[in-house]
Amino acid sequence: MKKIEIGKLPIFNWATGLEDGAILQARNMSILPFAFHHIALMPDAHQGYGMPIGGVLATEGVVIPNAVGVDIGCGMAFINTGIKKKDFKPYLPVIMGDVRENIPVGFHKYERKCDPGEMPDGYTYACAPPEIDRSMIPVVSSQFNNARYQLGTLGGGNHFIEFQIDQHDNVCVMIHSGSRNLGKQVADHYNTIAKKLNARWYTKVDAVSELAFLPLDTYEGQAYMAEMSYCVEYAKRSRSKMISRVCEIIESYGYNVAGQIHDVAHNYAAEERHFGRDVIVPRKGATRARAGELGIIPGSQGSSSYIVSGKGNRDSFMSCSHGAGRAMGRKQAQRELDVEKEKARLDNMGVLHAIRGVKDLDEAPSAYKDIDVVMENQADLVNIVQQLKPIGVIKG
């Protein structure tokens, strides 16, 4: 970790090769009047919208919608099936085909709504408990039925369903997904409100920084926290539904899946205690890493992923990376990378991959940082529990 002194608070940085835009965003965070103690940048950090992806900060008395982002609750699910590679590999192509047919990806969704009981409890418009004021969750209430079509769907971008092999040649399944349109609607709604309120209050927070805030002691702040929490749970249930469906497909070929599902979110804000103060900690593309806590850190579709155990490092607000992190912007990757070279790289590794043409290059391995360097840079944040290598990847 290196300390950067360019603002009001120090920036603790674990990343190498940070672009100027990410450094400027970290500086903007450091001069926020309600930011506490320091800013932390994980080793996969890169420029985001308002706040770097891979950024962590602590705030006192306020929450910043853009410090969580539009894919609220985005995270990872993982299961070790216990099935050996030699027994599984011959069926991998057909199993992947079945997964594509049964789990909508990209902009697609299910034709039928899920049962209301599959949705998170406590906040639904139809059955809110007495202690929950329905006016506290206007977006979830209005989007509830639409979200029922998307529960258990993958989405697009960097989301994936990946088949992997551990050190003992066991087949594992890893899923990266979020809260789909529901999270975006919540994020956009409250960021718009925050910007309007901040302008009305003549706040010192520069509007250009895109870090508009909501005080926690206001209706708007409490409503955002309630709706954000719903989206986090929604995303978790969505991943659970997908990974359970993948396991059902695997078992339909005569296998027995014996593992347990592990789930970790990396886009959310939580009430925590750090350096003797009760604060709100937004993690935007960062994984919580308390001492002994299991985390999931994916690579690209052409590199290893890792199951880790946190070390509880106070300087990172007990956090670590959420992946390898982008080395190139999406459009830049499509302009500069070579389709045939990227395909050959994955083919030579024996990976059934998702690169077909130029439009897929934004998710090519070369568009991402070297995961091994990222892991080396956070040796003081986590211990490696398992290394996982890809054998088949489904992208949105």
Image (cartoon, grey):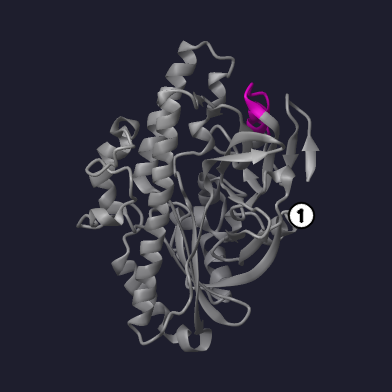
Comparing 305 with 290, the one in front is 290
85 lies left or right of 187? right
Which image quarter holds the C terminus? Answer: bottom left
- In the image, farthest residue toward the left: 112
x, y percent for residue 59:
61, 31
Q: Residues within 10 Å of mark 1 (few under 14, many from 20)?
A: some
x, y percent for residue 80:
51, 74
Q: Quadrant of residue 315?
A: top right
Whether 334 is among the magenta residues is no
In the rendered image, is residue 191 in sight? no
- In the image, farthest residue toward the front: 130
Whether 34 is among the magenta residues is yes
x, y percent for residue 373:
72, 58
x, y percent for residue 45:
64, 45
173 lies left or right of 345? left
**Residue for point 79% across, 38% down:** 3
Comparing 161 with 344, the one in front is 161
Q: Quadrant of residue 18?
A: top right
Q: Quadrant of residue 197?
A: top left
In the rendered image, is residue 137 in sight? yes
Can you identify the residue that label 1 sits on?
Answer: 380
Q: How many numbered marks does the figure carry? A: 1
172 lies left or right of 230? right
**Residue for point 59% across, 71% down:** 388
Report the magenta stretch's main SS. Answer: helix
Q: Magenta residues, as a range? A: 23-35
Q: Dot 1 lies on which element?
A: loop
Up-down relation of residue 356 to residue 336 (above or below): below
Q: Amino acid at mark 1?
A: Asp
Up-down relation of residue 246 to residue 193 (above or below): below
